[in-house]
Image (cartoon, rainbow, N blue to C red):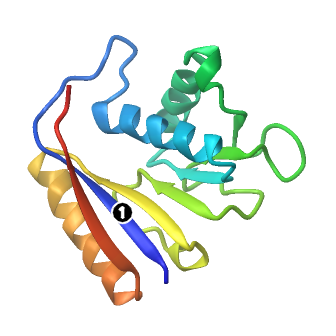
Amino acid sequence: MKKVIFYLLENQTEANESGVLYYEKLACQKIVEAWQANLRVQVACQDQAQAERIDEYLWQLSTDSFVPHNLAGEGMKGGSPVEISWPQKRSSGRRPLLINLQEQFPEFANVYHDIIDFVPVGEDLKSLARVRYKCYKEAGFNLKTISVTCD
């Protein structure tokens, strides 16, 4: 069965010095875990600026957490195991896991078996996450929510 895991952030944490938000950092941790489990990952960002923040953050991780990745349209044909895209620059290859950082329901969600999504703390972003949750449910996904306390 298709499934979505929502990570519900329990408290507010500021962005780090490079501007990476807590849920973006958590997304990067999930990318590393997926890569270490031999999964290919599509990361759907809200915009190019967010995609570039995620890309840069992944390059700064320790060698133990290295993840072969690229921005959509870069790298080898078919993309690397982890590809970071945004609405104007879509994926070049098929991957089993989608990590969604977009505020809206990804219209291409149905091609994925597993999706990770986030519920940030801000009320506007929470409201958008509720809409995505409803859309996933209507699309037939099995939904699970995991609470996360920001550190």
- Seen at 61% across and 77% down, the residue is 111
Instruction: For the C terminus, give its image quadrant.
Output: top left
- Seen at 84% across and 53% down, the residue is 78
- Is 37 or 85 nearer to us in this picture? 37
Side (left or right) of 27 relative to 23: right
In the picture as drawn, the residue positioned furthest to the front comes out as: 37
Q: Which residue is mark 1?
A: 5
- Seen at 68% across and 53% down, the residue is 40
Neighbor class of circle 1 (other Cα within 10 Å; few <14, some 14-19, many 20+) is: some
- Under tag 1, what secondary structure? strand
Would you place residue 95 above or below residue 38 in this image?
A: below
- Is 48 or 68 nearer to us in this picture? 68
List x then y, in percent, for residue 98: 54, 59
Q: Which of the 4 image quarters holds residue 29?
A: top left
- Is 115 or 86 nearer to us in this picture? 115
In the picture as drawn, the residue positioned furthest to the right comes out as: 77
Side (left or right) of 5 relative to 92: left
Residue 72 visible in rendering: no
In the picture as drawn, the residue positioned furthest to the top comes out as: 17
List x then y, in percent, for residue 52: 55, 30
Would you place residue 138 above or below residue 150 in this image?
A: below
- Is 9 or 16 nearer to us in this picture? 9
Of the residues shown, which amino acid type is indicated by label 1? Answer: Ile
Q: How many marks?
A: 1
List x then y, in percent, for residue 76: 88, 41
Side (left or right) of 58 relative to 72: left
List x then y, in percent, for residue 122: 13, 45
- Seen at 41% across and 55% down, the residue is 102
Would you place residue 5 above or below residue 112 in this image?
A: above
Residue 145 visible in rendering: yes
